[in-house]
């Protein structure tokens, strides 16, 4: 029964994704600007796969769940001449000008009376975009879920877990024992809150990103870079003498080779957060692009046979992406644990 329910849910997600993409294709909609169903000569606008894909994976002011159903979000701008200004993103939809501002390809600019960009003024944008709203939503969900899990631990002290606790406890235990403790060692408890938060934050946003109309949060390189920088800071603030000595003067290396090895070690220090950043960003974004590309084939060929085949392939790819969501959260947490473990590991004499 659970397998049937799981497969049915995945197929439903794929179908809704197809319908959402079709809705965008039928209206020729492009993010942040007005589009028309017909050209000046009366010819119907052709479906553009690249516009459809980029609209789904990029950030935007306002959260469009489907064509015609867009949630306005706060636009927060700062300019030296006007100070702080706050207004709804709906005022800039369809190329509108509001209070001298326009949204040009999700970049808000100041324009003059003729509609030309005023290059002398560059607004600083603090807006709540779709990605920011999605991040706040995922943070809220994590707080609600794990407050409930914590209450379950208190309520069922000495008893078998129940409810939501019984679902999350095996995952928490597996990550704690097989990933964090195994790679960091006896000092793992100090880093446990951060690493568990990291795992579940990435996991829940990976899964949310697969739902129709959702934000591509973990497919945004700014988000993955920020997570990698947190890891970089924690690793190097926790590092002991042995870690720094291994970078400055690796044991067993001849003196004349030390400058070369130092350069190699320093490059390695910065390659670690870079690999964390690119791996998560590329895998999540690549998966979304593949699924959307398959969906786009339906509108390019306009064939029932192609549509049926793409629906089956898209459903299979959605299942793969759910697996990738777990794998990427696991790998990011595993590598972070390994980096912390190498920084706090005590020296062992051979």
Image (cartoon, grey):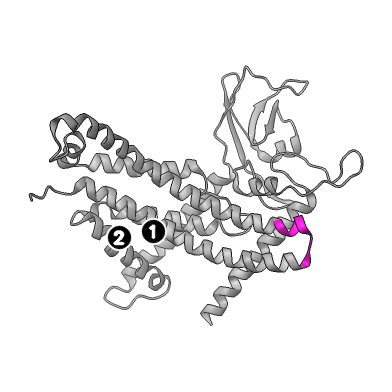
Question: Which residue matches tag 1?
Answer: 330
Image quadrant where residue 115 sits: top right
On the rendered image, what quadrant is the N terminus found in? bottom right
Which residue is farthest bottom? Answer: 1
What SS does tag 2 mark? helix
Q: Are marks 2 and 1 in contact (CB under 8 Å)?
A: yes
Q: Which residue is drawn at the image coordinates 26% and 39% (left, top)?
A: 236
Q: Residue at point 60% right, 18% down?
A: 81
| Magenta segment includes 299 | yes
Q: Is residue 197 above or below residue 4?
A: above
Residue where numbered disc 2 is placed? 179
Q: Position of residue 49 (x, y in %)?
A: 70, 49
Placement of 5 over or under 63, stated as above or below: below
Q: Which secondary structure dominates the residues rendered in magenta? A: helix
Left or right of 168, for residue 119: right
- Distance between the alpha carbons at the discs numbered 2 and 1: 8 Å
Q: Give the x, y percent position of residue 185.
A: 20, 56
Instruction: Label 1: state its secondary structure.
Output: helix
Q: Which residues are magenta?
A: 297-304
Query: Can you say whether 248 is above or below 110 in the image?
Result: below
In the orientation shown, which residue stands out farthest toward the right? 41
**Who comes first in sequence, dot 2 or dot 1?**
2
């Amino acid at each position: 029964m659970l397998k049937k329910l799981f497969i049915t849910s995945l197929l439903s997600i794929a179908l809704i994704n197809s319908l959402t993409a079709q809705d965008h294709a039928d209206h020729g909609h492009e993010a942040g600007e007005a589009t028309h169903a017909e050209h000046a000569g009366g010819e119907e606008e052709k479906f553009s796969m690249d516009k459809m894909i980029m609209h789904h994976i990029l950030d935007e002011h306002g959260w469009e769940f489907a064509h015609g159903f867009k949630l306005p979000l706060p636009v927060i701008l700062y300019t030296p001449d006007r100070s702080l200004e706050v207004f709804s993103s709906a005022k800039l939809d369809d190329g509108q000008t509001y209070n001298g501002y326009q949204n040009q390809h999700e970049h808000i600019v100041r324009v003059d009376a003729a509609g030309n960009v005023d290059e002398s003024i560059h607004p600083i944008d603090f807006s709540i975009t779709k990605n920011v709203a999605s991040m706040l939503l995922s943070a809220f969900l994590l707080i609600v879920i794990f407050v409930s899990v914590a209450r379950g631990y208190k309520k069922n002290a000495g008893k078998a877990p129940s409810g939501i606790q019984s679902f999350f406890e095996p995952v928490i235990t597996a990550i704690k024992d097989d990933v964090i403790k195994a790679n960091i060692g006896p000092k793992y408890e100090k880093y446990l809150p951060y690493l568990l938060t990291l795992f579940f934050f990435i996991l829940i946003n990976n899964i949310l990103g697969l739902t129709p109309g959702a934000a591509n949060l973990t497919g945004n390189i700014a988000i993955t870079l920020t997570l990698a920088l947190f890891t970089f800071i924690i690793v190097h603030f926790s590092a002991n003498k042995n870690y720094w000595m291994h970078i400055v003067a690796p044991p067993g290396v001849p003196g004349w080779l030390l400058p070369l090895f130092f350069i190699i070690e320093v490059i390695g220090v910065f390659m670690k957060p870079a690999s964390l950043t690119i791996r998560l960003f590329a895998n999540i974004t690549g998966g979304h692009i593949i699924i959307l590309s398959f969906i786009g084939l339906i509108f390019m060929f306009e064939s029932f046979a192609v549509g049926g085949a793409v629906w089956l392939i898209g459903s299979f790819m959605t299942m793969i992406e759910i697996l990738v969501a777990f794998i990427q959260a696991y790998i990011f947490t595993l590598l972070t644990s390994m980096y912390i473990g190498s920084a706090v590991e005590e020296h062992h004499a051979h």
